[in-house]
Amino acid sequence: MYTVAYSSSCDKANKWLKEHNLEFEEINLVKDQLSDVEILHLLSLTENGTEEIISKRGKAYQKLNVDLYDLSMNCLIKVIEKNRSLLRRPLIVDNKRFQVGYNEDDIRKFLPRSVRKIAYQTAEERIKKDLRLENAI
């Protein structure tokens, strides 16, 4: 999980992952260096390219005063490498899934399938019970 300090979204994601006993490595986007390969990997995971992972409202982007679409991939990677605060956060990655930001519903996709199945069955049982009670009234 790629994070920064003092980010409520990063703190929420960190807490959620720990509460669900999911092992993760935390990479601080300010303190830790990112290699070209890591940045390329993050870009390759997006569905919408830079739109998905670059924070255009942030000060770092405003200071750049450049259109990212005009940059070659190599130049874009170098810009991100030197301006890691351009990246939205947290960025949560595993070998199958990718999530930008913290969303309580979306982050559940990182739970193992068996856990998601149990949660679904429990919710389904509650709904059926509620329907039975409602029909009995």
Image (cartoon, rainbow, N blue to C red):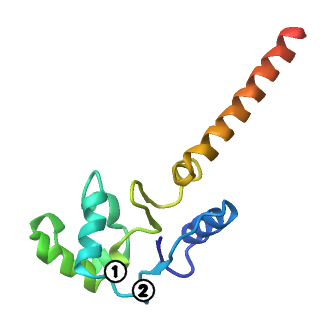
Q: Are marks 2 and 1 in contact (CB under 8 Å)?
A: yes
N-terminal-most mark, 2 or 1: 2
According to the image, label 2 marks what residue? Answer: 30
Position above or below: 89 against 78: above
Residue at the image point whose x is 47% and y is 70% from the top: 1
Which quadrant: the C terminus? top right
Position above or below: 124 against 16: above
Position above or below: 79 against 99: below
In this view of the protein, which residue sits in the foreground, 63 or 83?
A: 83
Quadrant location of residue 133?
top right
According to the image, label 1 marks what residue? Answer: 84
Distance, label 2 to label 1, CA atoms, is: 7 Å
In this view of the protein, which residue sits in the foreground, 23 or 7?
A: 23
Asked whether, in this view, residue 25 is left or right of residue 54, the answer is right
Q: Mark 2 is on which residue type? A: Val
In this view of the protein, which residue sits in the foreground, 101 or 115?
A: 115
Q: Mark 1 is on which residue type? A: Arg
**Image x and y of residue 95, in percent:** 39, 60
Position above or below: 24 against 125: below
